[in-house]
Amino acid sequence: MISAPDVVAFTKEDEYEEEPYNEPALPEEYSVPLFPFASQGTNPWSKLSGAKFSRDFILISEFSEQVGPQPLLTIPNDTKVFGTFDLNYFSLRIMSVDYQASFVGHPPGSAYPKLNFVEDSKVVLGDSKEGAFAYVHHLTLYDLEARGFVRPFCMAYISADQHKIMQQFQELSTEFSKASECLKTGNRKAFAGELEKKLKDLDYTRTVLHTETEIQKKANDKGFYSSQAIEKANELASVEKSIIEHQDLLKQIRSYPHRKLKGSDLCSGEMERIQDQPDQAATTSNPDESADTDLFTCRPSYTPKLIKAKSTKCFDKKLKTLEELCDTEYFTQTLAQLSHIEHMFRGDLCYLLTSQIDRALLKQQHVTNFLFEDLVEVSDRVVDKQKSAPPQPCQDRPLSRSLEECPIPQVLISIGSYKSSVESVLIKMEQELGDQEYKEVEVTELSSFDAQENLDYLDLDMKGSISSGESIEVLGTEKSTSVLSKSDSQASLTVPLSPQVVRSKAVSYRTISEDSIEVLSTCPSEALIPDDFKASYPSAINEEESYAGDSEGAIHFQASISPPVLDEAEEGSLENTPSQTDSSCCIGKESDSLGMPPSTPVHTLSDEDGVVSSPPQRYRQKDQGFPVDLAVENAHPSQDNTSEGFPAYELDPSHLLASRDVSKSSLDNYSDTTSYVSSVASTSSDRTPSSAHPAGPSSERHQKRAGQNALKFIRQYPFAHPAIYSLLSGRTLVVLGEDEAIVRKLVTALSIFVPNYSRSVKPVKHWVSSPLHIMDFQKWKLIGLQRVASPASAGTLHSLSRYSRYTSILDLDNKTLRCPLYRGTLVPRLADHRTQIKRGSTYYLHVQSMLTQLCSKAFLYTFCHHLHLPAHDKETEELVASRQASFLRLNLGLVNEDVKVVQYLAELLKLHYMQESHGTSHPTLRFDYVPSFLYKI
Amino acid sequence: MAPVPRVKLARQLDSSLEASVGQCQHIYSVAKAMPSVYDHMGEWKEHSEVFLDSADLWHSGPEREGIRVLCSLLNSMRRLPLLELEPNNKSPLQTIGEEQTQNPYTELLVLRAHRDIVRFLVQLDDCRFASAGDDGIVVVWNAQTGEKLLELSGHTQKITAIITFPPLEACEEKNQLILTASADKTVIVWDCDTGRQVRKVSCFHSTVKCLTILQRLDVWLSGGSDLCVWNRRLDLLCKTSHLSDTGVSALIEIPKNCVVAAVGKELIIFKLVAPTEGSLEWNILEVKRLLDHQDNILSLVNVNDLSFVSGSHVGELIVWDVSDWTVQACERNFWTQLDTQQEIKLCQKPNDISIHHFTWDEENVFAAVGRGLYVYNLQMKRVIACQKTAHDSSVLHIARLPNRQLISCSEDGSVRIWELREKQQLAAEPLPTGFFNMWGFGRVNKQASQPVKKQQENTTPCSLELIGDLIGHSSSVEMFLHFEDHGLVTCSADHLIILWKNGERESGLRSLKLFQKLEENGDLYLTV
């Protein structure tokens, strides 16, 4: 709420310079950075660059041993989302860049198959033909029936915005690691269960074979073995070997947590009576009702089967689904996590960045931010991130870096290091470029930067290579199994890589497809992977790139935000892409009004930092809106735009949120035809499984709806001001009505004005039908109350009139309000019924920023020492009180009843501040003896 | 001139009256028979109530009969909950609007721990109090923060008496003790610093209804069907014979090692004989029985060094001399002026004039008489101020504040703050003239739409002015406790305890604490 996204986006640096008054500058930690890519001439809310999908989605693919790479499922599971996007093709791409050291089988020197507990690999991949960029998270699951016991999977976050993937890499990595961990845990469990079953089967088979052999021995007393007997013995031997192998596997899978630190060694618990025989065969035998010795007691209900011969090698068998591979429970949990990820990263990068900045700044306001903020989702995530990622000094960065101009709060800098919950992970980001000469420059230069800048580099380089059309960039990350302390891993981030290392890796790459794959970086762990295996890695031949090295090391590159060719018809069919149509039409209009012809050729923007970005001209006629508009934005200082800027400001939030809020739930009982956003939003629907992270009261949609309804309330009721004043001053507002839906809707809307007691409690009760009690007024500040027509309502009304001094009563049926008089100036600004704001989300942000202002006033009032304590012993209380009054009136500019609002907030601040250490403190009910008035429409 | 009876026909604001059209028509037909009543039934539709206070209406025979019919009809309409008929021996309830500038209590804290009626509150020290009630538990609270400090459970039935046992000066144990008596015929001594149950006595034959402590002798007395004397270690020192089945209802200490016990209609004086060189035994002797009360004695207090006061169910207030146990003064005529109209007591409850509680200061005894409050001056030996209808229902507890203020709580769930003021000249009240003064109309909530009292007696030189009311409890407020520093604590039959605080002062205190905490944290930078 500190920075509405639109405000940030349009803020230019020169605006600040022209500020006439010289107030002391904001402290560094409160400054809001500019949008990092603004100076590169890109649109702050990058549109979907001609991608064939309407918005970001998550794709889960598998490299099936039968059919090759295949897509399994998408989140959201809705064909509208990915549209005509070729999932099969993209699965092939993403599965083909798996460099993880998955190796299962008989390693040389080991008698038994060994499971290799590999870490997930995380790569970033771009496909400019598809207009898709993806964060790809590879993981390996175990399947007893699969070849080598492994099933390679990957989860990919696919977005049309490369910046988003790069910028949010760390967050994506964290979140996907959680999902992956969940899948793998479930898989280990399922795999262990599978092994147990198999062992029981084997044991049973052995018993049967053994009995048969004995019978044969007895029957055949001639002294030599028949061929039948030899065959049986062989079978028996192979079964026993198989048992040993499986027991070993079970041991390995169970010892997983320990294995991470110390290598597993072969243990021989209960295999003493099993002799080793090299033959590999299957068994056939007659079903027999022999008593089985139940060695493995985990699944007593399982009835063992005889193992049929030669069944394992068949290709026509059905492979297990992902859900079967993991436990169903874990699988749904993973899906929930993935849809959470999808929710989290939904929307424009600019929006994500701004909200991250927003949250980071809010975190610093720990004294006041509980009042009006929903900090539920922030707290856990940001806190540990801040711990793990201390801010990195960036003074030594050259001025040519675009990000350098924007001091980004700590949240954004967290890319540098990543500490997973499992172990400390070393991420190396290296660069590999086809052009050797360039690589030399790059790598040497790279060595002087920290990890984040490496990322920046990658980002820039990607940009350059996108224009080549047919390239995949791979950002390799490696998790080292060696446990490093945090400081160690951070230190190693800045260790310069020698060019030799990079080059030597590059040698081993080879092409695997007709598309050229440019591997920017790959870092298989040398320690983990045998050499012969590494040789089989797919590598890349790079297309020629036209890079021109600057003498200072700055790079000239082509910034291409233009998408590849789209058919006109196809684009037409993709008109349902809400944000795309939104943005192009509104900004196009704006550029028209500014007199810029849409067919203006290339606008070359040169920033002072020497970075030249030139939008390509090829697709200009298609996407004229963007380059043109950007040129306008950059060429004209923003003063020119002030008159037109306002409508744009008005439009922006919806534009930003549109892609974030494409879905409209069926629960939404509110449909306002004037609501531009919701009409857009109805084009697609969200059918993702409701996640474990419920879209709480803080969700965007909720805020938007609440804002819209609040706006409606303000326009509809002339007495909205005293009602809002009641809420702000802590006087419980009872919304009385017969229709539950209407009451609930209004309560939700008005709840944006209700100050919270603490972080956890929101003092709002949406619907009550029993008579109110004094406790209710202490607990809740906004109550929806049912009006019953029956005589039973007498009690309700009676209690309402009895406690009338504690409440304001808004009667929805009679359209009346009974509450104290309000003559302040604060609420009219907060809730102007003639406001130009049309959108709920905009209004919500407006309210939030007004309330922040109010909070800061309350903060000042609360923490000004001299206001509350006598200056000397002889000073009377009256003097202190008059000092308070004059401070509120003169310094804070509060009139009449506004004083009470700030006083109430100050009391909440005090209580909250005290509570932090004190533990349990009860909220008190504060009230005034003031007469109420009845307002009618 | 005879007082004018008034009938208030109150009606609830909602439309339930319209629902019973048939009965309404019946009322109208009755009222039609009485033109002077009927004239104003039309007004009834607009107003929630109609006052019929015409003197001739009451005195002319047939109309009076008509009113009776009307009233009984209205009463039979159960759907009108607020309907009541009151003859004018009740002044209408004085109300105060929402603007209460003198009411300091602008903050409240609801404390919830009990599961049944909370009947007793007892102050432990400057910042702690204990509450007890029908659920048999005792809860110790912090009066400042409202924090629940301890919960003492040991009784199986409701608690009937609670008293603090101050620590002896000489005694090493400085812990505050409290004694609780319960309907399970036990008395428990608690250490309310640790929450420990110190001792328990369970040899009673009946429920102990009152406890008193004679600190001088370091003994305590329990009053049930007999009177027992105990020492601090809970040894039974002596006891009286069986006094009555109803038991001792009140017990106070008076000088010369005597105690006064209220047993039914009688006050019995007992003398306590402490062990001397001659005899090592304690003894308790009945000295005198005072039989001046005509009904059960409900309240008994020590007023000052010279006198104690007792009050009975029928509104007799007797001031006794503390040394020779003689009647110093007697006030029986709280209602005498109404005797002429006694026959039209339409809904007067029998306990309307019972004296529930006393409080006192140097010169006055304040009595809670039925629904009213009376101030009885000990020097002048007469009532100097009264508020006949201070509450909607019986006043259960009153207490005096230092600044001539009085707080009362009642069965109607409200707590009211009164101030004793010298009355203005009677001339200030103009004589009612004209039709509408004869027929007063108005809503209950509107303040002073009607002259509150007809000054038929110019005997009270002072008046009790309502300066504030505290509304929070949803049921009868049983008792309250006033802390000088922390405000007021009320307990109620709705199982709740409410802590009423001065909002401004609390705000200041919170600021003080805030800056203290800032200083502790080292976040406070004072600019010079």
Image (tube, rainbow, N blue to C red):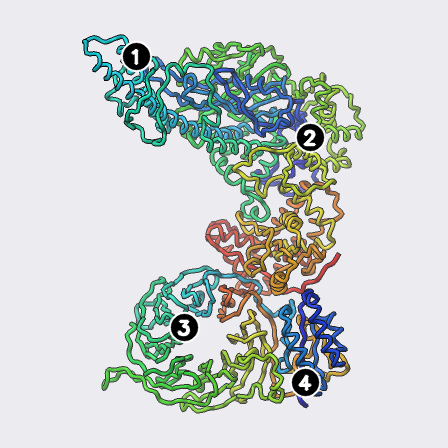
Q: Which residue is mark 2?
A: A578
Q: Position of residue A496 (x, y in %)?
A: 48, 20
Could you tell whether B169 is left or right of B92 in the image? left
Q: Chain of mark 3?
A: B
Between discs 1 and 2, the one toward the N terminus = 1
| Left or right for A82, reference A203 | right
Query: Where is residue A253 shown, x and y percent of the image?
Result: 37, 25
Q: A121 or A615, which lies in front?
A: A121
Q: Are marks 1 and 2 on the same chain?
A: yes
B502 above or below A756?
below
Q: Name, please, the residue furthest toward the front.
A: A219
Name the element at disc 4: loop
Q: In the image, which is nearer the foreground, mark 1 or mark 3?
A: 1
**Closer to the camera, A673 or A197?**
A197
Q: Helix or strand or loop: what does disc 2 sit on?
A: helix
Q: Which residue is mark 3?
A: B161
Circle 2 packing at 10 Å, graded few (<14), some (14-19), many (20+), is many
- Spatial separation of the CA atoms under disc 1 and disc 2: 64 Å
* Residues indicated by labels 3 and 2 sit on the same polypeptide chain: no
Disc tally is: 4
Residue A162 picture location, percent across and down: 60, 24
Classify A518 as above or below A23.
above
Marks 1 and 4 sit apart, C-alpha to C-alpha, by 120 Å
Percent from the top left, x then y, of residue A808?
65, 59
**Label 4 sits on what residue type?**
Val
Q: Where is mark 4, residue-wise?
A: B4
Q: Nearer the viewer, residue B396 or A499?
A: B396
Q: Chain of mark 2?
A: A
Element marked by disc 1: loop
**Which three-letter amino acid code belongs to the residue tagged 2?**
Pro
Q: Which label sits on residue A278?
A: 1
Q: CA distance from mark 2 to mark 4?
A: 80 Å
